[in-house]
Amino acid sequence: MKNLWVAICWICTTYSIFAQNFALSWNPLRTLDLVGPTFYIGGEKALANSNKKTLQVSVGFGNWENWVETSIPNNIIQPTTTFRYGLEYKYYFKEQWNGGYVSAAFEARTTHRYVDNWRLVCESGECFEQIFTEKRIRNTFNTMGRIGYFAKIDNYLFLDLFTGAGIKIARKEGGEGFLFNSLFRLNHNHFLHPAFSLGFRVGIFIN
């Protein structure tokens, strides 16, 4: 949690000082992510010498209970810790923070969790069940093209609607995961997936 507050302070301080126009947004749908739910915020600033281009930097953190995987029987899922980092370059058709836009986005996510598995151990002719703890790490890297619409609610509030598509590379350490992963396997640990984006952000202007 300390890292999240450091990132928030960095975004607010840096952009408030060096940008005449700045927007702070929250993506509520990231808290519903099944793999790594996070509290995800972004700071968007107007680029110099342009009235149509902006750059958004986003950070997120989450430490939540996860679902129980069915791929491995008798396992116990402990809370999942997730960090997200994003960068999005926007081009507005009319002017900054007004109407439609297109964007190119990149996001990295790292998820850590420990799984306690009950395993049958047989030694000296005797068998018993013992818990073995396994750390699982899943890193993903997304590249995404988006089209969106930025709607002002008043002078300070806004709603940002967007959709898009791209590709995602995932690296997993520990555990086999779900069977569908084999369809996108590049090698033992790396997977390539199609990625889709549909959501919204809410936020405020800081001028």
Image: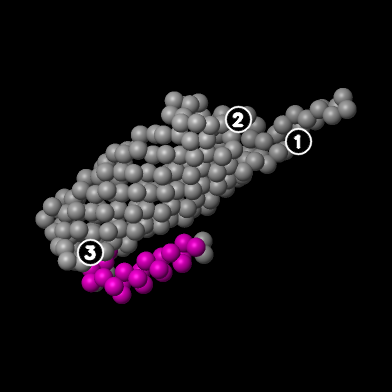
Is residue 20 shown in magenta?
Answer: yes
Taking the image as shown, residue 193 lies to the left or right of residue 79, namely left
Residue at mark 3 = 46
Q: Answer whether labels 3 and 2 touch (C-beta < 8 Å).
A: no
Task: Answer few, some or many: residues within 10 Å of disc 3's Cα (few below 14, many 20 plus, some between 14 and 19).
Answer: many
Q: In this view, does 148 lie above or below 52?
A: above
Inspect the image, locate mark 2, and give the three-letter code of the amino acid beneath it: Ile
Residue at mark 1 = 130
SS at circle 1: strand
Q: What stretch is highlighted in magenta?
A: 3-23
Question: Which residue shows up at 34% across the image and 54% down it?
Answer: 87
Q: Answer whether labels 2 and 1 touch (C-beta < 8 Å).
A: no
Question: Which residue shows up at 23% across the image and 64% down it?
Answer: 46
Q: Quadrant of residue 21?
A: bottom left
Task: Answer few, some or many: residues within 10 Å of disc 2's Cα (few below 14, many 20 plus, some between 14 and 19).
Answer: some
Residue 166, image x, y percentages = 31, 39
- Looking at the rendered structure, which numbered label has been put on residue 185? none
Q: Residue 203 or 7: which is nearer the viewer?
A: 7
Q: Is residue 198 above or below residue 206?
A: above
The colouring scheme, among rainbow, by chain, secondary structure or one colour, is: one colour
- Looking at the rendered structure, which numbered label has been put on residue 72? 2
Residue projecting furthest to the right: 124
Q: Residue 201 or 94: which is nearer the viewer?
A: 94
